[in-house]
Image (cartoon, rainbow, N blue to C red):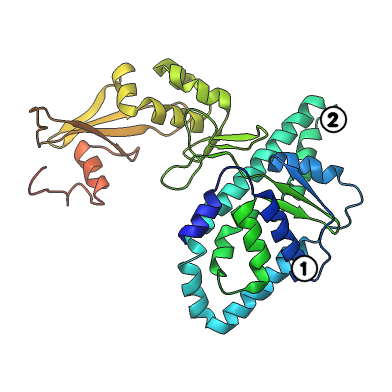
């Protein structure tokens, strides 16, 4: 699995010669003549344009190259192993990558479609131009073979299927690709990929995903944001956070700024205090309140001081003890620690 995890996350220049050889193998395995030409592009966004500009390429052969072999090999392995065996195989292979690779592929599709829709909105006279372009771009993107981002299902067949060897080799050497009878449009891999511990796109000081032609996606803990929004995080103030109308962006601002810092600088007042700590509440327009419990570690640091921690708790929390208990999966009545550390 480490090999396929690395494939899915690989960045840097594609091995074009190896990728083209692998595409040829995939065509031959499908009973097709090898494509006569390759059109290399710098990103899936550029690929949409390249696919639209193809001439004399023939029809798409994605079904023969990818869809049919995958379905038939899955049926073969499933029948050989039985339902329980297939579930066990998938659980220790593809399932470990499925959520993150699927989410990344969908994020790329959405980002490309949004970028092309924005271009259409700037240049089109029809108010529906952006929506039409977004739908048309998604249709092209859904016709791609995902290369490295097919790593999840390819992992389940590693060493089990010669029929998928060409597809697996392309995945190790390149990004997304579009197979036609006489030509292939094929993408470079990203040059940057930044994710959080949950596998979500995440970066606060630049693009979370970037391709060599400049197409990039920005995100904070999986949430799509703009480059301009990220650049403004360094100069945040409590007032700027309060006046942000978009509730999701306001949450990003609070996470970046720090709930404790916001409380200290916005003049917030405690709503409850008991032996466990202090409950604070931040009222946000058009959004649920943010509730935090301030607790002090009873064990002193080496210098004799006691460190303060902030625990985010459900908005309806009424007491500090209820909030602390919730972090342990308990209600306030059941929370009675024998010793504090």
Residue 170 figure quarter: bottom right
Q: Percent from the top left, x then y, of residue 143?
A: 75, 54
Q: Which residue does the image show at 59% across and 78% down from the upper left?
A: 77
Q: Which residue does the image show at 44% across and 42% down from the upper left?
A: 196
Disc 2/disc 1 C-alpha distance (Å): 45 Å
Q: Which residue does the image show at 77% across and 68% down from the upper left?
A: 28
Q: Percent from the top left, x then y, of residue 111?
A: 65, 39
Q: Which residue does the image show at 63% across and 43% down from the upper left?
A: 108
Residue 146 figure quarter: bottom right
Taking depth in this image into account, of 12 and 89 the one nearest to the observer is: 12
Q: Residue furthest front?
A: 17
Q: Which mark is residue 28?
A: 1
Q: Residue 108 carries which label?
A: none
Asked whether residue 249 appears in the rendered view, the answer is yes
Taking depth in this image into account, of 204 and 245 the one nearest to the observer is: 204
User: Which is more foreground, mark 2 or mark 1?
Assistant: 1
Q: Is mark 1 on a helix, strand or loop?
A: helix
Circle 2 sits on which residue?
126
| Disc 1 packing (10 Å; few <14; some 14–19; many ≥20) | some
Residue 239 figure quarter: top left
Q: Percent from the top left, x then y, of residue 232?
A: 50, 20
Q: Is residue 335 left or right of residue 54?
A: left
Q: Earlier in the sequence, mark 2 or mark 1?
A: 1
Q: What element carries label 2?
A: loop
Taking depth in this image into account, of 93 and 270 the one nearest to the observer is: 93
């Amino acid at each position: 699995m480490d090999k396929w995890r690395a494939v899915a996350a690989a960045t840097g220049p594609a091995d074009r010669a190896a990728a083209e050889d692998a595409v040829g193998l995939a065509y031959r395995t499908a009973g097709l003549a090898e494509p006569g030409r390759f059109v290399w592009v710098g990103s899936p966004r550029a690929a949409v344009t390249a696919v639209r500009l193809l001439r004399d390429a023939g029809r798409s052969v994605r079904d023969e190259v990818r869809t049919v072999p995958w379905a038939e090999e899955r049926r073969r392995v499933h029948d050989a192993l039985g339902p329980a065996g297939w579930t066990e195989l998938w659980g220790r292979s593809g399932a470990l990558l499925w959520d993150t690779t699927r989410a990344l592929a969908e994020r790329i599709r959405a980002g490309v479609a949004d970028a092309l829709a924005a271009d259409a909105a700037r240049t089109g006279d029809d108010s529906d131009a952006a929506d039409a372009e977004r739908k048309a771009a998604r249709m092209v993107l859904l016709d791609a073979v995902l290369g490295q981002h097919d790593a999840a299902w390819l992992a389940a067949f590693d060493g089990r299927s010669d029929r998928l060897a060409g597809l697996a080799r392309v995945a190790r050497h390149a990004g997304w690709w579009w197979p036609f009878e006489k030509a292939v449009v094929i993408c470079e891999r990203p040059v940057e990929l930044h994710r959080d511990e949950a596998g979500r796109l995440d970066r606060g000081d630049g693009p979370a995903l970037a391709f060599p032609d400049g197409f990039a996606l920005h995100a904070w803990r999986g949430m799509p944001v703009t480059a301009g929004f990220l650049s403004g995080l360094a100069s945040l103030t409590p007032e700027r956070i309060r006046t942000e109308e978009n509730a999701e962006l306001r949450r990003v601002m609070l996470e970046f700024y720090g709930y404790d810092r916001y409380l200290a600088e916005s003049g917030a007042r405690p709503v409850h205090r008991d032996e466990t700590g202090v409950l604070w509440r931040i009222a946000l327009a058009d959004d649920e309140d943010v509730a935090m419990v301030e607790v002090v570690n009873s064990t002193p640091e080496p210098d004799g001081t006691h460190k303060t921690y902030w625990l985010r708790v459900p908005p309806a929390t009424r007491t500090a003890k209820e909030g602390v208990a919730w972090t342990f999966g308990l209600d306030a009545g059941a929370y009675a620690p024998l010793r504090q550390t």
